[in-house]
Image (tube, rainbow, N blue to C red):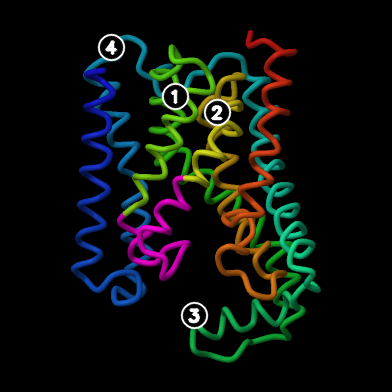
Amino acid sequence: MRAIAVFLVVTFGFSWAVAARLQADGGLEGAGVWATLYLTVFMFGPALGALTCAILFDRGRRLKALGLAPGRVLPVLVWSVWGWILPIILVGLSSLLVLLLTRSAPADAATQLAETVLQATGEDLPMEADTLLMLQLAVGVPVGILTNTAILMISEELGWRGWLQPRLAPLGFWPAALVSGVIWGAWHAPIILMGYNYPGMGWGGVAAMIAFTTLLTPYIALLRERGGGVYAAGAFHGSLNAAAGVGLLYLPDPVFPWNGLLGVAGFALLAAGWPLIALYRAKKKPA
């Protein structure tokens, strides 16, 4: 408990201090291009907490404690590949479910992307919108997945799944996933209140984020438990971050509660997958 307390103090203290500085500089909108840098630094709070605790409490086993030495190479490779694939499936299914529940036709993704680029840059597109969409799907998404995987593996996932998950393991898989999911969601609170992911929702957005991370955690926890280490967790998180925005391009009005995987359709989809995870764990015991 002492180690977990130190982890939480360092993690939340660092990240929330960065968020406070971002807010002082005008928040997500007022900080302009610097907002991205602030958010990136914010993500390293869990890594700092994990490294601090590994140094203080895990002498002689620090790499293993961080999930950087999970064991055999094959499970790491297999579960990392699944980590890249599963979020794409979840994002696609959640967008389809939104369209079915709202009885809507898919939006023109190329037009949506063009409008997003125009709002972000204030400049006309250098190419046709359809061409831009094709480049985004063929190049932007794969590059985004790999880049996000590398960054998230050494930042958030080094803390949440790398260090914290094994510490909570004595609670059992599902209680540990519940606890870590709530912690993970609450950690986002300052940037959610600034409008990240759930703009204009305030504390309702924080509650939605906690619901999302709690429902999502068993999926990533399974990859970590089965020998994928922090590598597979980073792959899942990186793929999710890269693919989520693409899924929203096909939705006519991607705001809560119909904002894909982060909305009610996504929540229902993630919850529906829990029995499948439980069934898999019952039939395939960890090595």
Front disc: 3 or 2:
2
Calculate the distance from the C-alpha at mark 1 to the C-alpha at mark 2.
7 Å
Is 196 colored magenta in this rendering?
Answer: yes
Determine whether the residue tagged by mark 4 lies in a helix, strand or loop. Answer: loop
Q: Which of the two labelled residues, at mark 4 and mark 1, occupies the earlier sequence position?
A: 4
Q: Which of the two labelled residues, at mark 1 and mark 3, occupies the earlier sequence position?
A: 3
Q: What x and y, as percent, mark residue 150?
A: 50, 43
Check whether the beta carbons of the residues at disc 1 and disc 2 lie within 8 A of each other: yes
Check whether the beta carbons of the residues at disc 4 and disc 1 lie within 8 A of each other: no
Q: Which mark is residue 120?
A: 3
Q: Which mark is residue 222?
A: none
Residue type at mark 1 is Gln
Determine whether the residue tagged by mark 1 lies in a helix, strand or loop. Answer: helix
Is 271 colored magenta in this rendering?
Answer: no
Q: Residue at x 68, y 27 (%)?
A: 277
Calculate the distance from the C-alpha at mark 3 to the C-alpha at mark 2.
35 Å
The quadrant the N terminus occupies is: top left
Determine whether the residue tagged by mark 3 lies in a helix, strand or loop. Answer: helix
Q: Which of the two labelled residues, at mark 2 and mark 4, occupies the earlier sequence position?
A: 4
Question: What residue is pinned by disc 1?
Answer: 165
Question: What residue is pinned by disc 4?
Answer: 59
Question: What residue is pinned by disc 2?
Answer: 221
Determine whether the residue tagged by mark 2 lies in a helix, strand or loop. Answer: helix
